[in-house]
Image (spheres, coloured by chain):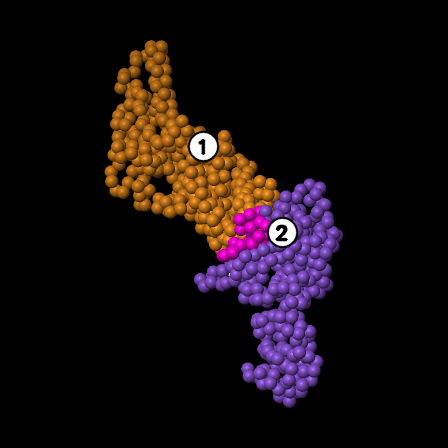
Amino acid sequence: MPPMVQTQKLCKSFRRSDGSMVDAVKGVTFDIEKGEIFSLLGPNGAGKTTLISMISGLLAPTEGDATIGGFSITQQPIEAKKLMGFIPQEIALYPELSARQNLLFFGRMYGLGGKELNRRVDEVLAFIDLADRQKDRIDTFSGGMKRRVNIAVGLLHRPQLIYMDEPTVGIDPQNRRRILDTVKQLRDQFQMTVLYTTHLMEEAQELSDRVGIIDHGEIIALGEQGELTQQVGEEDRIEIGLGNRAVPATYPAELQAQIPGVTRILYTPAEQLAEGSSQSTPARLTAFAKRGRTALPQLIQVLNKDGYEIQSVEVREPDLEAVFLALTGRALRD
Amino acid sequence: MHSILNITRNDLRIFFSQRGNLMGLVALPVLFTLVLGWAFGGNGDNSAPRLRVDLIDQDQSAPSAQFIDDLHRANDALVLCPADNDADDFCQLNGEPLTVERAIARARNEDTEALIVIPAGYAEGMASFAPVQIDFYAAGNPTLPNPVRQSLDVVVQQASSAALTTNVLDAVLQDVTVRIGIDALTQNLRSQFATELYANVQTQFADRPDTVRYVASAGEDAASVDQGFGQSTSGMGAMYVMFTVLGGMAVLQRERAQWTLQRLNSLPVAPWQILAGKMLTYFCLGMLQFLVVFATGLLVGLNYGRNWPALMLVMVAFVLCCTAIAFAIAPRVTNEEQAGGVARLLAMALAPLGGAWWPLEIVPPFMRQIGHLSPVAWAMDAFHDLLFFGGRLTDILPEVGVLLAITILFFGIGVNSFRKLLA
Ligand SMILES: Nc1ncnc2c1ncn2[C@@H]1O[C@H](COP(=O)(O)OP(=O)(O)O)[C@@H](O)[C@H]1O
Ligand SMILES: [Mg+2]
């Protein structure tokens, strides 16, 4: 079976307002197979939205091309777009119109009409469980409800392929759960192909058949989750949250030398969550070890001796976060 | 086509779902059209237009002076050059003498409204009740009403009625003297009597100025009501069309920020269809705006006569022009606020510059020329032609042509950069 989506060396450069160039996507090549959930996992600014914009025909690539079901997105955009439902990261709805009016409008734009249109609208409203609020204006909805309508628009014409760009940003856990279940339902019940972007390791882990990890506009790892975690070896990861005392640059190496079985230690300084915000993530030491549970007591002992305040300790099996850390030396931050 | 109409219908529905938009589309334009219309057309002696008319008195006699006096009385808007020239050289004589040749050229170039020549021998002719010819030159269609000629007609009629009355009375007098057998009055006496009689009749007319002026002033007043609302409907129409249509720039930027524009672009429709749908939206709103304002004019008694098709043509050309400008600028601003600011600034600058607030006919010539940088001026010229000067469809084609040329220019720019808004 030919892949649903094929990209060939996609590149996108933007000109900043000061005249300098940003390479947001640098020669990305990958396939998405029919019927799979493919996740693009990467931190903010990695190039996920730019990439998804190019393969949905919004942005013309600076170089390269992509085919959707065999149609080139640059040469045959209309045919390619008929196959896909694009669900943008923003709530791309008309706030002045009701949920139903929004759905009717976009449905007509897909060429639907008459009874067929009304049936599809009823269907997707039931699917997102908002039939009772369909006559209300979008600007009276909660963030989670808006997100669900946003998704419904992309499902109206029953596309084979769905793009979802960070569909869980800024909503409560309950609505997030609902959306994640919806995504799996699309694959399992409707045999749709899903491209899902996120900066949350847990989401990628739960949903994906295959994952592409993207950073600075490049795919740095690609494959099934098992394959990826094997790439970083069978090592456990020990996450230690530290108090506010700063850690000298040479300390991680010294620490590693004192504890057998630890292959590498990375330090991530404390970071403010947002400018002007009082909240911050604590400084962290991340140690990789074949058997995390045996290395842990020794680690704690040495840290105590050196006078560091330990706030939290966590031992994790190999996961996508570890892959990202191993490849970039940085953490994927929420 | 289906997609284009669907986009337009949806945009219009969103436009009308916002109360504030109805304020801008109906309430404010209607209010300002009325207020300005009354202000321009009202009992404003001071705002009354001044008509520059060359008058050459080759007779320089008491009757010719009387004639000039009567002209003034019949229409106080007349500035009879060179006699009435003021310190600002309203007559535009530049200190040079006014010969008949120069005056004819001035009238032909429409530097003056008209030229009136009182020939030598006028007094003599009047005295002997022989026909005298007053020469009248004016550019433009002689069959159309012209305030100067109307005033002149009144005065000439008055003078000849006086002469006629005198003639009749003189004849009666002679008849009577013959019948009752008195010696015929000497020619000298009779002529003296007739002259007195003539002067008397003239005085009678002058003492009842209302009846005489009635003809002229009724016409004048009617014209000034028309002028007030003619100016205010075309001016406020053009200005609010700019507000409404250029306001589309802000809406486009909002749609870009809320990603509905990009979502449209992710659907199986061509970018040109999205552009066409959006343009059609603002074209419809612009036309609707004009209709609201011109309907207001209709309600207060403005008479568009058979000019509807020509007026519509000007409206279409102007709305197209504004739409093209909006879509040329929209991709070049960065957000909704900036777009709104640019739209207001443009409307508030181009409207007065182009004569939407006061007629360009009253500003100095160089301002009039600068004003024609604004598309508003071309629309106003065409509207004035149709509403005041009896212009027909063919008379406004040049203005419509200019508006369409501006449209094509900006349309080209807009089409090229519209894609920027879609991604
Ligand atoms: N229109 C644009 N102009 C300039 N730079 C852009 C533009 N869009 C995105 N970028 C830059 O490209 C990079 C990738 O952005 P984006 O694709 O939005 O990342 P992500 O969706 O993964 O958070 C960022 O550095 C961003 O600042
Ligand atoms: Mg993004």
For disc 2, the marked residue is A84
Chain A colour? Answer: purple
For label 2, being within 8 Å of ligand 2 is answered: no
Query: Which label lies toward us, 1 or 2?
Result: 2
Q: Position of residue B120 (x, y in %)?
A: 26, 27
Q: Nearer the viewer, residue A231 or B327?
A: A231
| Chain identifier of the orange chain | B
In percent of the image, x 48 and y 47: which residue is there? B415
Q: Few, some or many C-alpha atoms within 10 Å of disc 2 (few <14, some 14-19, many ≥20)?
A: many
* Res A139 visible: no
Q: Does residue A16 belong to the magenta stretch?
A: no
The amino acid type, in three-letter code, at marker 2 is Met
* Chain hosting mark 1: B
User: Which span is picked out in magenta?
Assistant: A53-78
Q: Are marks 1 and 2 on the same chain?
A: no
Q: How many marks?
A: 2
Query: Cβ–Cβ below 8 Å for labels 1 and 2?
Result: no
Q: Position of residue B408 (x, y in %)?
A: 45, 43
Q: Few, some or many C-alpha atoms within 10 Å of disc 1 (few <14, some 14-19, many ≥20)?
A: some
